[in-house]
Amino acid sequence: MKAAVVESRPLIGFGIQQVLYRIQDIDDSCLVSPGPARGLTLDGIDLLIVGDLLQGYDDAMLQLLGTAADVRGVLYLSAGGTVQWMPPREIAPLLSWLPENAALEAIEGTLRKMIGAMRRGCCTGTPSEGDGQAARAAASGAAIVLPMPTPPQLFGAGAPESVSEAQLLSLTQRQYDVLVLLSKGMSIKLISRRLHISVPTVKSHTLQIYRRLAANNKTEAVFVARERGALLAAISAAAEAA
């Protein structure tokens, strides 16, 4: 089975590709950076992971995706789980999605479930006897959708997610809030306005984040945080209220 990762951020794409290397069913995988590239194609790809697209679904991206005629499964990493594109296939593919800041463990678990379903033939037109629902969905031309898995609890059911993740990363709550906003692509000035703190303070927090996560830049910091299991889904309630 061949897989491809379409992702704007190289380090995040590299991390996802490392997950693919751990899955024995994947014989070959490649990392594709969105943008105009002569001769670039997704022909022969069975499983497609579509991550963050800084330029969105522009003409170049749609042209590239249009070559994915063999794709049987698509995992979207997006904020709202919206399906913005469907592979050009007569039989609907297997679809699933995760938040754009999902941990690599969650991505690996979802990919293994998708591959297992693909191996059983639920989206090839030959569903197994136990896949009646998949068979009906394929026959009707509708996409077969796997639900998003529930993320694991880090510090027990009573701990707020943002606080537990700050502790997981050895960050203060304010540093964690800054990291969350950095992961969403916000600039230093926008973070300053959002959190009602000065630009120098945001820069100071950012440097501390890099030191504690042993990162050289924003992309590496976000990658390390997600590698450690942080979802970076939301800032703290106090910061949001402010």
Image: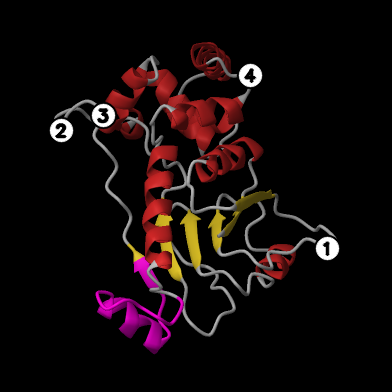
Give the vertical position of 42 relative to 173 (above or below): below
Q: Which residue is mark 1?
A: 39
Q: Amino acid at mark 3?
A: Leu
Q: Are marks 2 and 1 in contact (CB under 8 Å)?
A: no
For marks 4 and 3, the one nearer the N-term is 3
Q: Which residue is mark 4?
A: 216
Q: In the structure shown, which secondary structural element does the residue marked by tag 1 occupy?
A: loop
Relative image position of residue 72 (x, y in whole percent): 51, 70
Relative image position of residue 98 (x, y in whole percent): 41, 51
* Magenta-highlighted residues: 124-145
Could you tell me which residue is drawn at 53 percent across and 46 percent down?
20
For marks 1 and 4, the one nearer the N-term is 1
For marks 3 and 1, the one nearer the N-term is 1
Q: Which residue is mark 2?
A: 157
Q: Amino acid at mark 4?
A: Asn
Distance between the Cα atoms at labels 4 and 2?
33 Å
**Quadrant in the picture for residue 141:** bottom left
Q: Amino acid at mark 2?
A: Ala
